[in-house]
Amino acid sequence: MDTAQSGAPAPVLFGKSRALLGWQGFTMHIPREWNPGKFSGTRAKGDLRIDDPNGVRIEISWEKVSTKTPDIAKSVANFLKQLQKNGKKSKMPLQISEKAHVISRKRTDKTQITNFGWVGDANAGISCGYGFSWYCPVCERVAFAQLFGHKNERPGKIEALAREIFGELECHGTGGWETWSAFDFAIDVPVEFELKNAKILLNKLDLEWIRPRPIAFQGWGRRAERLRLQRFPVANVLLDGKTLEEWSDWNIVSKNKILRVGAAQETLIKGHEGLIYEGGAKDFRSHLTVKLFDKILRRTTPAAQIRVWNCTQSNRIFAFESEVSSANIHVPDDVLDGLACH
């Protein structure tokens, strides 16, 4: 319904550009200038902090639990009690918003939804906070999400902003895939692959996902399956006086601590001229073990690949690395199909 015709106030982010944020199964749309400032942990237990140009805006924490009846309301009450206690110690008392409303308790995709809010010193760097906690029976995690107000921001506006952003927050992927998105990139990765390493520095990205090798017979002689995405900014500067192959041979291939690959072959990637390298484990014993069990079990382990391309539209160089089993040989192409490089 048109807000002007209905008389309802426009959303806080009305007319503002937003981007998809995806991390450890959580997805939501946030203002484009907001991005992860700090992250730690795994899909089972961890936390994520999202910053805007002026400081911290959102904190999300989660933990997988063994019981399906966690007491969310009690956990939130303890959190608010400790928050008030800390405020008194620092001589910055705060008030609890007893009627905070961020997420409807009628939502069926989350259970034990408990809203909360608090208001502190209007002149403080963080003046208030609104959020909610819940249990998700699908990903079996208890999660806690909170959005902060900055100095002299009206609590009512921050509560409305939290309601708008958290209203579409999801905590797990669909169809066996999870979306990872931040800093103007987005990629879908099978849920079986868990994030192992993530480095984000000055628009340079390096993320690696691992699928542990199967236990028992299916895992004999196998290596863990891997997917890795690297993104390098200002490609025109990096390639100044060099071909893509020359740059890639030195910066991607020679610095790779895991794979040993052959000479590059020219190919087309995402509509751009690119390179593909094929090979296997750099560790000789690991490489020999895979070959030995392939022969004994009459199977074929696909070659590891590194694909490199220069996206001229975004002026970035991408490198996508993959080690997969024959059952997942389609996965690298599927992942690349969903990656937008510009």
Image (cartoon, rainbow, N blue to C red):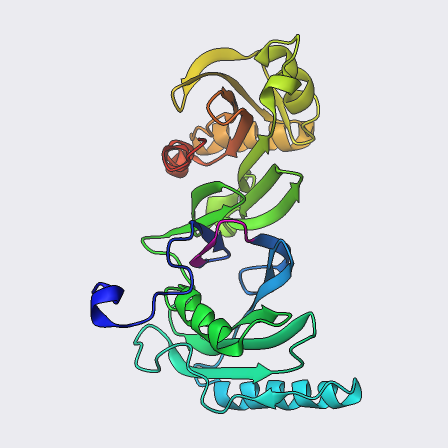
Q: Position of residue 135 (x, y in %)?
A: 44, 77
Q: Position of residue 320 (x, y in %)?
A: 52, 30
Query: Looking at the figure, which quarter contains the C terminus?
Result: top left
Residue 183, by quadrant, is top right
Would residue 163 be found to the left or right of residue 231 on screen? left
Residue 12, by quadrant, is bottom left
Q: Is residue 63 above or below residue 173?
A: below
Residue 108, by quadrant, is bottom left
Decide if residue 214 is in sight here.
yes
Q: Position of residue 192 (x, y in %)?
A: 45, 51
Would residue 256 be found to the left or right of residue 183 on screen? right
Would residue 140 be found to the left or right of residue 36 on screen? left
Q: Is residue 8 above or below residue 218?
A: below
Q: Give the extent of the magenta segment.
A: 27-34
Q: Is residue 325 above or below residue 291?
A: below
Q: Residue at x 55, y 28 (%)?
A: 319
Q: Position of residue 77 (x, y in %)?
A: 56, 90
Q: Is residue 74 above or below residue 104?
A: below
Q: Residue at x 65, y 87 (%)?
A: 94
